Image: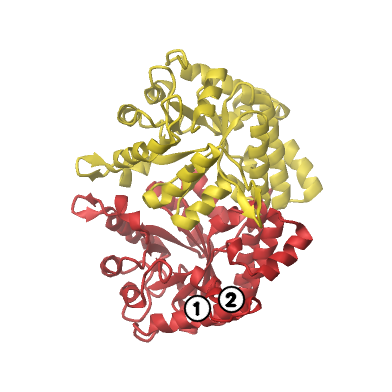
Chain colours: A red, B yellow
Amino acid sequence: MAFDRLIENIVKTQNPSVVGLDPKLDYVPEYIKEKKFKKYGKTLKGAAKAIWEFNKTIIDEIHDICPAIKPQAAYYEMYGYEGVKTLYKTIQYAKEKGMFVMTDGKRNDIGATMEAYATAHLGLTDVGGELVEAFGADALTVNGYLGSDGINPLLEQCRKYDKGIFVLVKTSNKSSGELQDLMIGNKTVYATMGSMCELWGKDVMGKYGYSGVGAVVGATYPEQLAEMRKALPHTFFLVPGYGAQGGGAEGVSKAFDDHGLGAIVNSSRGVMCAYKKEDNCDEHDFAKAARREVIRMKEDIISYLPKITLE
Amino acid sequence: MAFDRLIENIVKTQNPSVVGLDPKLDYVPEYIKEKKFKKYGKTLKGAAKAIWEFNKTIIDEIHDICPAIKPQAAYYEMYGYEGVKTLYKTIQYAKEKGMFVMTDGKRNDIGATMEAYATAHLGLTDVGGELVEAFGADALTVNGYLGSDGINPLLEQCRKYDKGIFVLVKTSNKSSGELQDLMIGNKTVYATMGSMCELWGKDVMGKYGYSGVGAVVGATYPEQLAEMRKALPHTFFLVPGYGAQGGGAEGVSKAFDDHGLGAIVNSSRGVMCAYKKEDNCDEHDFAKAARREVIRMKEDIISYLPKITLE
């Protein structure tokens, strides 16, 4: 139920971090691109095939030490429907390997349309009576600006298919405060959204104290992480902004509870492009470099946490 | 520039309405589904092919009397990457027929990721030096919760490729007020977002007084339509909620300026399912019924407006 499987994966790997698979073509080693462009031309299909090999190789190398991946839909849509096919294959492959998959789509709409998004990304699509998985992720990031009409259809799928959502609360970017930090009475917009998460989560509680309605809270705002951790005891946090965006492990530790749980920290470029940053790393070893960065990041984060345990 | 082409289409057709192509399989006539399921099975591909025939036939029938279509991404994603391929084909076909295409995706993210969405839906993707159109819509709906970091990458594509965006301001659903109607100082959240639209639009002004940054303001809130029309003189409105959701033509008229411009009203189900509502309409005539509904809706809306003119 809810994020229970994610939490179990985190405890098993003792790793509260998730690898963001946001594969711009620039990140893919030249030898893979050359091979695919030779076969398919410099086309969206060629790009999508290159990204698929890149993703698959990274998943093969990290699935035993990393609890989850977070593919960002934008980077697949950028390569058209061929790119979106690679998104599907990536989700399915990571799940086969036992990883928890969160699609980062920040989807939002209302009523029947939000049901369609929920069905697309978390549920099963009815095709003339046959139920088919369109994408089949375990969780989806969503934007709550439209209120409960935008969230309720998701909760139904979460209950039915044992899935979760992460609602944007306080994002990691510099201009996040333009709206999110404004005051509604004596509460910020982001705290107001956070309270809605606790409310929405009541009907999808998991067995480890966290509901199926998580929140995105950026690593770049440690004070707000601490404030939200205290205010939202049943809300699991997805924390972007570690590394490239400037969030450090000590700040990030504010997102966790006394058992080293309650949050998962994302790194995308840091892992995908690790081979570019290491001295003398052959590009053929890109996935091994990714593995080394996953381990480095994990050690960095858990050095500020209590032992991760379900007890 | 900006929404100039949309405005010219509206003047030419004397029709300030847009058809939302949100094709659930339920909306597609049985004879089309039977044909495609026979050929491709009850699969996502079969569903996607059925939807493509449905969309194409409607576009063929209405393109001379309707300025624009608004495909809703969720209904294509629901049928997996095959569905997303149908989205691409629908966009390209409607543009060939001279229609203005707004993809309703309510996308939102920051920095490089928002650039990826902008590239995907409005721009050109770089594949090893070749520039390829991934989806190629004329405009995209977006969610501004993340602030300027989420909007600036879009404005760059709007300037470069002559495209537009619609930012969610006041949505048409019942629970839209949970966040959007709350007060930030002496201003609602939605009015605050509206002011940001005017600001963001300054650098992408078109020649008819409207910028490339439009706003979504629901037909179900006529008072807010009037308030926003007055407060946001350079912001073009996309108005959902007419018909099925309860918004009437008189209320909707508040979204327009003194030249009958400044807004476009959406209808989705009303048009797509017109054949189901007409007495004794053969399902083979679904597109002719759609055309009749487009005309009925247009007459209804313009009966409350001054003559639509650029003078």
The chain carrying label 1 is A
- The foreground one among B276 and B206 is B206
The first of marks 1 and 2 along the sequence is 1
Q: Position of residue B131 (x, y in %)?
A: 64, 49
Q: Position of residue A278 (x, y in %)?
A: 53, 79
Q: Residues within 10 Å of mark 1 (few under 14, many from 20)?
A: many
Q: Position of residue A131 (x, y in %)?
A: 65, 56
Residue drawn at 46 percent across, 67 percent down = A2
Q: How many marks?
A: 2
Is any part of residue B141 visible from this angle? yes
Q: Amino acid at mark 1?
A: Asn
Mark pair 1, 2: CA separation: 9 Å
Q: Secondary structure at mark 1?
A: helix
Farthest residue to the right: give it.
Answer: B39
| Res B233 → quadrant | top left
| Res A233 → quadrant | bottom left
Q: Secondary structure at mark 2?
A: loop
The chain carrying label 2 is A
Is any part of residue B145 visible from this angle? no
Query: With respect to residue B51, does B258 lie above or below?
Result: above
Q: Position of residue A288 (x, y in %)?
A: 59, 81
- The foreground one among B200 and B19 is B200
- The foreground one among B113 and A137 is B113
- The foreground one among B181 and A286 is A286
- Is A161 placed left or right of A172 in the picture? right
Query: With respect to residue B208, does A39 lie above or below?
Result: below
Find residue A9 and name its label: 1
Q: Amino acid at mark 2?
A: Gly
Query: With respect to residue A273, does B288 lie above or below?
Result: above
- Is B144 placed left or right of B162 in the picture? left
Question: In which quadrant of the rendered image does the C terminus of chain B lie?
Answer: top left
The residue identified by callout 2 is A98
